[in-house]
Amino acid sequence: MIETMAILLSLLAVTSFFLDFSPMQKAYYVHYRAPHRRMHPFKGTFEPRFYHSLIKLSKESNAGRLLRESSNRFSTLFRIVPTDYLTNQYSKNMSIYDNLIQTLKDRGFDTDKRAKTIYFSTLPLVFLEGSSINNISHYYCYNDKDEIEIVLWEVHNSSGDRSDQVSRKSISSEYTYCATVPRSFYISAVDNRKGFYRFSYTLPIHKTEEGTKEIQSPRSKVTLFDERMQALTTTRLIPESEPIPITFQSTIAMIFKRPLQNLSILLTLLRQVYFITIVQKVRINRNVPQGITLNRKHGMPTQSSNEAGVLGWTDEDMFASHARRVFEKALARALNESHKDLKVVIKYTDKHIPGTHLETPESKTELTLLVRSWELYKQIIVAPNADYVYNILTQRCEDLVRASDGRRFYELLRDLKTDSHSWMYTRIRE
C-alpha cells in the first residue's frame, strides 16, 4: 500500500514538473541480481534483484531532478542520502563527492592525480521511501589517463554502521581485480568480527581496441573468511543489463518495477530471519558497537595493522569519556610524582581525534600510546592490576593500545593512582 501511494504521488510530481526532468549526464541504472550464499554458522541462499545507480561523481553531479543527493523525501524521484555514506566527521552537509575527496586526502592519497574521474555505484531510494536494502557501494577512482587508481568499498550494515576498505589492485582470473583485507569493524549481529574480506571486481570504464571509452556494468563479489581463511559468506553483484541512461522514461519504468521487487526481498528476509532465530536459534546481539577491537572469546587483534580499513570512529560515549579523563588524570599524577623524566603522548588511529600531551618541565623521554578504540578506557577503568592492562589490552593480545616502549608503559601503569571518589576505579597496581 505504501509503495502504491508512492507511485501515485511520484506520477503527480512528474506531471507538475515534467519539463524539468531532463536526462542526467553520465548517470545510469544497472539491473543486478545478487546471489547471497552463507556457509557458516548456518547455511542458506537467496537471490534478490534490484537496480543500482552508476553515477559519475563531480561537484555538478547533484543537479538533476530524477536522481539527486538529498535527505528530503519530496525532493526527487530517486535520491541518495549523503549522510548514509563515508563519514560524518567533517560535516553532515557535505556532498558525497566532497566527502570522498576529503576522506582520501586525509588517508594520504593525492586526489588531484589519482581521482580525476570518479564513478559511484549504490542503491538509490525511491520517492517517499524511508530506507533501502543496500549491502555495498563502490567508488571507482581514475587518473587523467583513465587508468584505475583507487577502488573504495563501503560495506553497509542493517544497524546503520558502515565499514570502508580501500582495495589494492591485484589480478584475478575471474574478475579484473581482487584484493584481500582484514575486517576492521563489526558487521553482522550473528557473528564476530574476526577474519578477512576478499573483494573481486570489474571496472565501469572499458577501453576498446580503437582507444574509445565505453561504460559497462561492473561485476563484483565479496567473500567473508574467518581467521583460518574458511569462507563464511559470499555475495555477488551480477549485472542483468547494460547501463541504462537515467531519463524520464527509464525512471518511471523502474518505479513500476520496484514494488514487486521490494516485496520479494522483504519476504525473503523475513524467511531468513525466521530460519535464523527460530529454527537455528541463533542469538542476535543488537547492541554491539562499531570499531571496537576487543574480542573476549579468542583474545586476538581484529583490526588491520596498517589502519587502511579505519575511516573514522563512532562518537565517544559517556562511560568512555569519564574513563579517559580518569586515566589521563592518573597519568599526569604519576608523571609529577615518580616519572618526571617521561613525556606521554596519546594518539588515535582516527586522525580526526585530537591527541593528548602530558609532560613535566623535566621530561626528556617520550612514550607514545597509539589508542585503537574507546574501549581501551572502559577496560582500564575496571582492570584488576597493571599486569592485566599490559598483557591483555596492549598489542600483546587485544591490541587496544600500542606503546612505543612496553617496559616504561608497564612501569608507569604500576604507579598509577586515582582519587578515592573515582567510581569503579581505585588503583591499577599490585
Image (cartoon, rainbow, N blue to C red):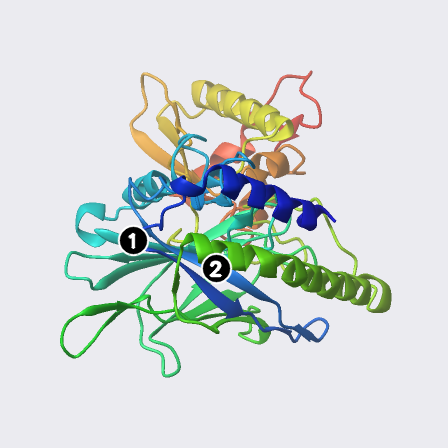
Identity, as a three-letter code, of the amino acid under mark 2: His
Residue 271 found in image quarter: bottom right
Residue 259: where, in percent of width, then height? 65, 57
The residue at the far right in this view is 278
Disc 1 marks a residue whose amino acid type is Ile
Among numbered discs 1 and 2, the one appearing first in the sequence:
2
Give the number of the mark in front: 1 or 2: 2
Q: Position of residue 282 (x, y in %)?
A: 79, 62
User: Which part of the image, by quadrant, shows the C terminus?
Assistant: top right
Residue 163 horizontal/vertical position (percent): 50, 51
Residue 118's disc number? 1
Element carrying mark 2: strand
Asked whether residue 301 appears in the rendered view, the answer is: no
Asked if the residue at tag 2 contacts the one at tag 1, i.e. Cβ–Cβ closer than 8 Å, the answer is no
Which disc is residue 354 wearing? none
The residue depicted at 47 percent of the width and 19 percent of the height is 337
Q: Nearer the viewer, residue 188 or 204?
A: 204
Badge 1 element: strand
> What residue do we see at 44% from left, 18% from top?
336
Q: Is residue 189 left or right of residue 182?
A: right
Cα gap from disc 1 to disc 2, whole angstroms: 16 Å
Estimate how packed mark 2 is, as few (under 14), some (14 to 19) or many (20 or more) residues with alpha carbons within 10 Å. Answer: many
The residue under the point 18% across, 46% down is 112
The answer, for residue 384, to whether it is visible in the render is yes
- In the rendering, at what x and y percent does residue 135 appear? 55, 58
Relative to 151, is 19 above or below? Answer: above
Residue to which mark 2 is pinned? 52
Depth check, front residue: 228 or 101: 101
Residue 218 or 320: which is nearer the viewer?
218
Please report the residue visible at 60 percent of the width from the left and 55 percent of the height from the top.
133
Mark 1, Cα crowd under 10 Å, few <14 / some 14-19 / many 20+, is: many
